[in-house]
Image: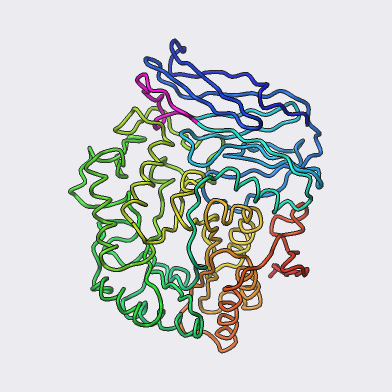
């Protein structure tokens, strides 16, 4: 691969044939800044192309738009059919090369890498339509190329990810504790959460860094939807936060900010897509105030962590596992504010959440990875694990941890989701291994269980919480052979897991 970032061509794609779109680039060493200006044109895409010959036997790993869904792997270039959102790494198992864009770009960017070169699709749309820049000059993204001689792929990719993110925000201490979703699945109560918090505090006895108890979906009157009014089973959310804190844990809570059945949020305040008006449009000032009020309410209740969910699906109509080169499949729709790109709108929304949340930690779930970096402390990097099916935890938890671990502490803290313990559905010898891996991973560690666990499980959980407080070195080793790596190097020792049921 002989790659010169300065040697490229580009194509402009607008709703009509382009007339006044101007593309500018600034090249410095191994970076390329891409700017665009348009007055009349409704810009949709800019496609950049670098032509060169590449070895077909290279292994390539790319990123995904939001969470991963068990699909991550090093694939041979000659067999590679996927588009890679944000960045990719290519390696011959010794040297490696990385190419991508910096975090918080003002466009969605995906890559196609073949034996004849690289194509980058820069998506500048507003909804499914072209954006009205109205003469505005916009920096769309910054491309960054790097190459490394190290065979330690996790270390090389981590170094590269740090080059992509100038402003990560990280917790002051490791984040761990309980989340009630994978034993409750939305059916819980004030009393149960208070009990869970006491159990988390007991497990963390003697640890100065206190655990969180996160209340997931089910505390509000409508399942998985606003308005964010407490239901009868939870009664008083401020009092519950106080009780969690008094027990020795820290209160956290889940919310879905763009979905509500509140009739005050009329159809004209909602995104019009595929003939429906369902989710709130965050470009409308009244909607922004409504969202801010929900976050302020939770902050005033005393919660220290806010998990906000569903923004990819609600903004763009799809989850990441149904997408390829672009983040929305639906054409001919737009946001209320048609002058900003989809990426700008998403960034503005995440900034609104962060600014309103203040000192609360944020966990992004179903958030756009490259856009939430620097705007959340934690990000769910994979789809849901399970308290019911080990195969799901194996696919979603272990795969995502292995292949996105390099992003940890470079973009945010990578949350690979929970160890779910429910009615012995999953053999403890399997869940215990996932718990062990997470406790050494330097990533957030959440478990989902009540105090109705065995003495063995209680002992293993407490031990994992103590191990988790220390910094460790870790990397997967069998990444070319296995989509759910079994062989890991942890603190200089080789550890082999058996993930098979």
In this rendered view, identify the residue nearer to me: 214 or 80. 214
Please tell me whether residue 36 belongs to the stretch shown in magenta: no
Which part of the image, by quadrant, shows the N terminus? Answer: top right
Picture coordinates of residue 484, whole percent (x, y): 69, 59
In this rendered view, identify the residue nearer to me: 46 or 37. 37
Which part of the image, by quadrant, shows the C terminus? Answer: bottom right
Instruction: Please name the predominant secondary structure of the magenta segment in the image.
Output: loop
> Which residue corresponds to the image point at 25% horizontal and 44% vertical from the top-left?
287
> Which residue corresponds to the image point at 48% horizontal and 41% vertical from the top-left?
104
Does residue 265 sit above or below 231 in this rendering?
A: above
> Which residue corresponds to the image point at 30% horizontal and 31% vertical from the top-left?
337
Using the rendered view, name the quadrant where residue 109 is placed.
top right
Picture coordinates of residue 17, whole percent (x, y): 46, 12
Please tell me whether residue 131 belongs to the stretch shown in magenta: yes
Q: Is residue 211 left or right of residue 360?
A: right
Using the rendered view, name the quadrant where residue 144 is placed.
top right
Q: Is residue 284 left or right of residue 97?
A: left
Instruction: Residue lying at the far bottom in this picture: please name it.
Output: 455
First to last magenta residue range: 124-140
Picture coordinates of residue 329, whole percent (x, y): 47, 34
Instruction: Residue lying at the far top in this picture: please name it.
Output: 19
Instruction: Residue lying at the far front in this picture: please name it.
Output: 28
> Which residue corresponds to the image point at 34% horizontal and 27% vertical from the top-left?
339
Picture coordinates of residue 409, whole percent (x, y): 56, 56
- Coloring applied to the structure: rainbow
Does residue 32 sit above or below 446 in this rendering?
A: above
Q: How many tags in the picture?
A: 0
Using the rendered view, name the quadrant where residue 309 is placed.
bottom left
Q: Is residue 74 left or right of residue 165?
A: right
């Amino acid at each position: 691969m002989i790659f010169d970032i300065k040697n490229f061509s580009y194509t402009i794609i607008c709703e009509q044939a382009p007339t006044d779109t101007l593309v500018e680039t600034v090249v410095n060493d191994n970076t390329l800044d891409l700017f665009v200006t348009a007055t009349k044109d409704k810009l949709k895409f800019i496609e950049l192309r670098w032509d060169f010959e590449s070895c077909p036997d290279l292994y390539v790993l790319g990123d995904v738009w939001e969470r991963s869904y068990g699909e991550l792997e090093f694939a041979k270039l000659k067999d590679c059919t996927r588009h890679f959102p944000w960045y990719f790494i290519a390696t011959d198992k010794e040297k490696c090369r990385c190419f991508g864009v910096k975090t918080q770009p003002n466009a969605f960017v995906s890559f196609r890498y073949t034996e004849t070169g690289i194509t980058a699709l820069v998506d500048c749309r507003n909804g499914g339509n072209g954006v009205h820049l109205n003469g505005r000059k916009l920096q769309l993204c910054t491309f960054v190329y790097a190459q490394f001689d190290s065979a330690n792929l996790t270390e090389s990719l981590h170094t590269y990810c740090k080059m992509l993110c100038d402003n990560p925000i990280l917790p002051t201490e490791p984040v761990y504790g309980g989340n009630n979703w994978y034993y409750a699945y939305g059916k819980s109560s004030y009393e149960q959460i208070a009990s869970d918090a006491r159990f988390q505090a007991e497990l963390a006895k003697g640890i100065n860094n206190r655990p969180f108890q996160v209340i997931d979906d089910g505390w509000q009157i409508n399942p998985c939807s606003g308005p964010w009014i407490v239901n009868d089973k939870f009664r008083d959310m401020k009092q519950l936060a106080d009780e969690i804190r008094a027990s020795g844990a820290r209160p956290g809570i889940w919310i879905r900010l763009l979905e509500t059945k509140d009739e005050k949020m009329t159809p004209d305040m909602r995104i019009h897509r595929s003939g429906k008006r369902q989710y709130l449009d965050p470009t409308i000032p009244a909607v922004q105030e409504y969202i801010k009020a929900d976050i302020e309410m939770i902050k005033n209740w005393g919660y220290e962590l806010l998990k906000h969910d569903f923004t990819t699906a609600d903004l763009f109509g799809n989850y990441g596992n149904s997408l390829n080169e672009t983040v929305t499949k639906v054409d001919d729709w737009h946001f209320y504010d048609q002058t900003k790109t989809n990426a700008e709108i998403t960034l503005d929304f995440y900034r609104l959440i962060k600014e309103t949340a203040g000192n609360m930690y944020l966990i992004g779930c179903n958030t756009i990875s490259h856009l939430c970096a620097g705007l959340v402390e934690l990000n769910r990097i994979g789809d849901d694990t399970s308290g019911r099916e080990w195969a799901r935890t194996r696919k979603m938890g272990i795969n995502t941890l292995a292949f996105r671990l390099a992003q940890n502490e470079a973009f945010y803290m990578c949350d690979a989701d929970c160890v779910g313990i429910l009615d012995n559905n999953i053999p403890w010898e399997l869940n215990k291994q996932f718990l062990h891996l997470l406790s050494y991973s330097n990533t957030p560690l959440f478990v989902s269980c009540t105090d109705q666990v065995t003495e063995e499980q209680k002992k293993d959980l407490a031990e994992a919480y103590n191990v988790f407080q220390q910094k460790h070195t870790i990397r997967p080793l069998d990444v070319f052979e296995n989509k759910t790596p079994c062989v890991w190097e942890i603190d200089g020792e080789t550890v082999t897991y058996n993930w098979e049921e």
